[in-house]
Image: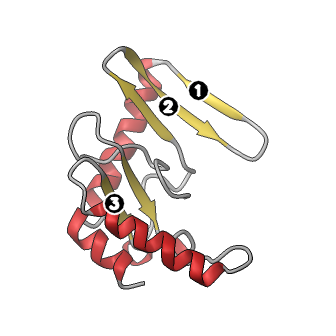
Amino acid sequence: MGLVGDAGTASAGPGAPGAVLDDAGDFVLRLPIGRGAPEVMRGQLGHLVRLADRNDVSIRVVPANRGGHPALAGHFQLIESKDFTPVIYIDSENSSLFLEEAADVVAYRRVLAGMDRIALDRAESKRFIADL
């Protein structure tokens, strides 16, 4: 999983941006990349902690110790708007895909519901990130 939006929107309220972050293998939240990586990572983690204080943003973490989860097949985004029909967006190294069929959206909503059940709550997720 990557960072923002990877497992779709988490419940912070209607229309609120959200993310469910999979910490499997200590990868997503712990992997420093690039020059100056440790300092950059500290800044990014601090930014996530500050975002977690906002009522209009939801950040939820699925720690590695929770084991397998419904989104192991890969990251995706549920894109919703009051003006448009919901779609699922999936991207990879060299392609991307929009799923627009209602059955596909329903299937990915089930994945999000499963993630919601096993993820830390918002306060626990904030503490998890702050403790890294």
Q: Secondary structure at mark 3?
A: helix
At which x and y percent is residue 109?
A: 36, 37
The residue under the point 30% across, 51% down is: 57
**Mark 2 falls on what kind of element?**
strand
Residue flagged by tag 3: what amino acid is it? Leu
Q: Which amino acid, mark 1?
A: Phe
**Residue situated in front as seen by the camera: 121 or 38:** 38
Toward which corner of the image does residue 8 lie, by quadrant? top left
* Image position of 102 with respect to 72: above or below: above
Q: Quadrant of residue 33?
A: bottom right
What residue is shown with label 1?
A: 98
Residue at x-position 68% and y-position 80%: 36
Which residue, given by chain and number where applicable, does mark 3 sit on? Answer: 51
Label located before the other in sequence (1 or 2)? 2
Asked whether, in this view, residue 93 is left or right of residue 106, the answer is right
For the point 43% across and 84% down, the residue is 132
Q: Which mark is residue 88?
A: 2
Q: Identify whether 34 is placed above or below 132.
A: above
